[in-house]
Image: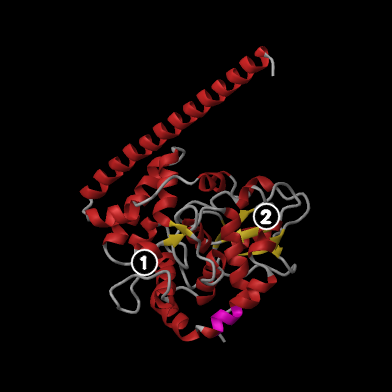
């Protein structure tokens, strides 16, 4: 090797070494920055009464997970059409399984339905969509997931609040740290409650002193029903229905009032007079109900739905139009207890 080659090789090694040192320093600074951030969370948690030992156990070895940030940027609803989403989330297999679960848990679901005023088919539909009836509730540690999202900065205030709520739940003894698993977004248990929803709506139905949304179906069913009941569910109504629209229908009336509280929309009789019919072409129900028109896709090719107040209750659970429509679709196909 000539002297020039030796010099070039030496320079290359020096550059690589310098780059590696800078990367290591940057990583160290980032780690330190996260550590400082954790100390801020510790202070907030202490002010909420969270025990020091609980906090230390919860944050032992916690580091931001890049995969969680990736998942946050690429949610299914943003990459699937409504038709794709519906066929995937409310598949024939899930419909069949939902009917089985309704039958298997008939007694508990009937009791919960009467107590909270929620038709069991909707509880089962939510259970099925959220976790495939408890089979898949997420493999992420909730504290790590929420810490990652809170530290990321995109929605830091929201996720920091949820992180503190999760720490309170641990402190209250409802679940052990190792068992507090959920989705990448921090949604927990078989009905995928965020920690704030857990605090507001979770129920200890079996009276064991814990609100166990991970392993106790009685708590899961009661908590889901309590949530819907608390946000205005009316078991005298369904959620809505798919409809057909006449030619040259004015699509600009779609979605008006669908998300708003109160009696928004038009009476069913008014929709009837505009040529709107059930999906099978028959007349709309004659009940004096107000409904809003929802088109989950753009233009005339979109399926059309008339939705009632219970649709807005589902939107309170999850603000996704795809999600809310699919819950109703699945519940209708699961059917009532027989």
Q: Secondary structure at mark 1?
A: loop
Residue labelled with disc 1: 202
User: Magenta segment: does it hold 101?
Assistant: yes
Which disc, if any, is residue 82? 2
Q: Residue at x 58, y 18 (%)?
A: 11
237 left or right, relative to 305: left
Q: Residue at x 35, y 48 (%)?
A: 161
* Residue 82 % position (x, y): 67, 55
* Residue 59 % position (x, y): 34, 51
Magenta segment, prevailing SS (helix, strand or loop): helix
Quarter assignment of residue 117: bottom left
Residue 241 appearing in the image: yes
Q: Cα distance, mark 2 to mark 1? A: 30 Å
User: Magenta segment: does it hold 263?
Assistant: no
Q: Around disc 2, counting alpha carbons within 10 Å, would you say few (fewer than 14), some (14 to 19), or many (20 or more)? A: many
Q: In the image, which is nearer the foreground, mark 2 or mark 1? A: 1
Q: Secondary structure at mark 2?
A: helix
Query: Relative to 113, does residue 157 appear above or below in the rendering?
Result: above
Residue 50 appearing in the image: no
Looking at the rendered image, the quarter that the C terminus falls into is bottom right
* Residue 210 % position (x, y): 31, 71
């Amino acid at each position: 090797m000539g002297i020039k080659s030796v010099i070039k090789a030496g320079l290359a090694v020096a550059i690589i070494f310098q780059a590696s040192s800078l990367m290591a320093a940057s990583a160290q600074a980032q780690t330190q920055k996260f550590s400082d951030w954790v100390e801020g969370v510790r202070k907030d948690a202490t002010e909420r009464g969270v025990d020091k030992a609980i906090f230390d156990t919860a944050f032992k070895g916690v580091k931001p997970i890049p995969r969680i940030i990736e998942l946050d940027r690429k949610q299914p609803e943003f990459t699937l059409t409504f038709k794709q989403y519906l066929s995937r989330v409310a598949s024939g297999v899930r419909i069949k399984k939902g009917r089985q679960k309704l039958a298997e848990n008939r007694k508990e679901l009937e009791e919960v339905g009467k107590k909270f005023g929620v038709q069991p088919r909707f509880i089962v539909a939510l259970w099925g969509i959220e976790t495939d009836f408890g089979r898949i509730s997420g493999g992420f540690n909730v504290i790590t997931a929420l810490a990652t999202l809170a530290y990321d900065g995109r929605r830091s205030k929201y996720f920091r609040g949820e992180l503190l709520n999760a720490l309170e739940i641990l402190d209250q003894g409802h679940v052990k740290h190792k068992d507090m698993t959920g989705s990448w977004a921090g949604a927990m248990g078989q009905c995928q409650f965020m920690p704030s929803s857990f605090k507001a709506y979770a129920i200890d139905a079996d009276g064991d002193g814990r609100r166990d949304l991970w392993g106790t179906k009685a708590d899961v069913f009661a908590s889901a029903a309590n949530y819907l009941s608390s946000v205005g569910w009316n078991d005298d109504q369904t959620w809505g229905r798919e409809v057909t629209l006449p030619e040259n229908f004015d699509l600009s009336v779609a979605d008006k009032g669908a998300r708003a509280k109160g009696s928004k929309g038009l009476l069913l009789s008014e929709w009837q007079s505009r040529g709107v019919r059930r999906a099978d072409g028959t007349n709309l129900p004659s009940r004096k109900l107000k409904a809003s028109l929802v088109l989950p896709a753009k233009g005339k090719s979109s399926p059309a739905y008339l939705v009632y107040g219970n649709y807005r209750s589902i939107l309170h659970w999850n603000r996704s139009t795809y999600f809310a429509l699919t819950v109703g679709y699945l519940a209708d196909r699961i059917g009532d207890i027989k």
